[in-house]
Amino acid sequence: MTTTAPEDTPEYDPTLVALRVEEAARRLSIGRTTMYALIRDGEIETIPIGRARRVPAEAVIEFTRRRMQQHATTPIAA
């Protein structure tokens, strides 16, 4: 049985190596504004491609790894 994505949600394409900001935000389940803030703060790398700015798919993975490591070393208050 196959499922289809809703009409208003673009399908996830695992073959993309460079993502639009909106696509990168969707992969992290965050909003576009939050993604731009992460880019502005240097948390997520972008690269220029022509006149556009793209987020390397690997940058999203690396960001997630860093956050996981930070979270693992931060004690949780009881």
Image: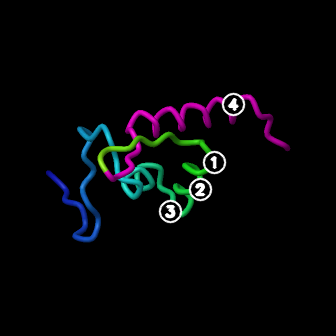
Which mark sits nearer the N-terminus, 4 or 1?
1
Q: Distance between the residues labelled 3 and 2?
A: 10 Å
Q: Which amino acid does label 4 sit on?
A: Ala
Q: Viewed as shown, does residue 74 lie left or right of 32?
A: right
Q: Main secondary structure of the magenta part?
A: helix
Q: Distance between the residues labelled 2 and 1?
A: 6 Å
Q: Which amino acid does label 1 sit on?
A: Asp
**Residue 12 covered by magenta stretch:** no
Q: State yes or no: discs 3 and 1 in contact (Cβ < 8 Å).
A: no
Q: Mark 1 points at which residue?
A: 41
Q: What residue type is labelled 3?
A: Gly
Q: How far apart are marks 4 and 3 (CA)?
A: 24 Å
- Mark nearest the camera among 3 and 1 is 1
Residue found 14% across the figure and 51% down from its top: 1
Quadrant of res 47: top left
Residue found 27% across the figure and 50% down from its top: 12
Q: Distance between the residues labelled 2 and 4?
A: 23 Å
Q: Which residue lies furthest to the front in this view?
A: 51
Which mark sits nearer the N-terminus, 3 or 2?
3
Q: Name the residue under label 3.
A: 31
Q: State yes or no: discs 2 and 1 in contact (Cβ < 8 Å).
A: yes
Q: Badge 4: how crowded within 10 Å, few (<14), some, or many (20+)?
A: few
Which mark sits nearer the N-terminus, 4 or 3?
3
Question: Which disc, if any, is residue 37?
Answer: 2
Q: State yes or no: discs 3 and 2 in contact (Cβ < 8 Å).
A: no
Q: Viewed as shown, does residue 63 lie left or right of 47?
A: right
- Mark nearest the camera among 4 and 3 is 3
Q: Which quadrant would the C terminus be assigned to in this image?
A: top right
Q: Badge 1: how crowded within 10 Å, few (<14), some, or many (20+)?
A: few
Q: Name the residue under label 4.
A: 72
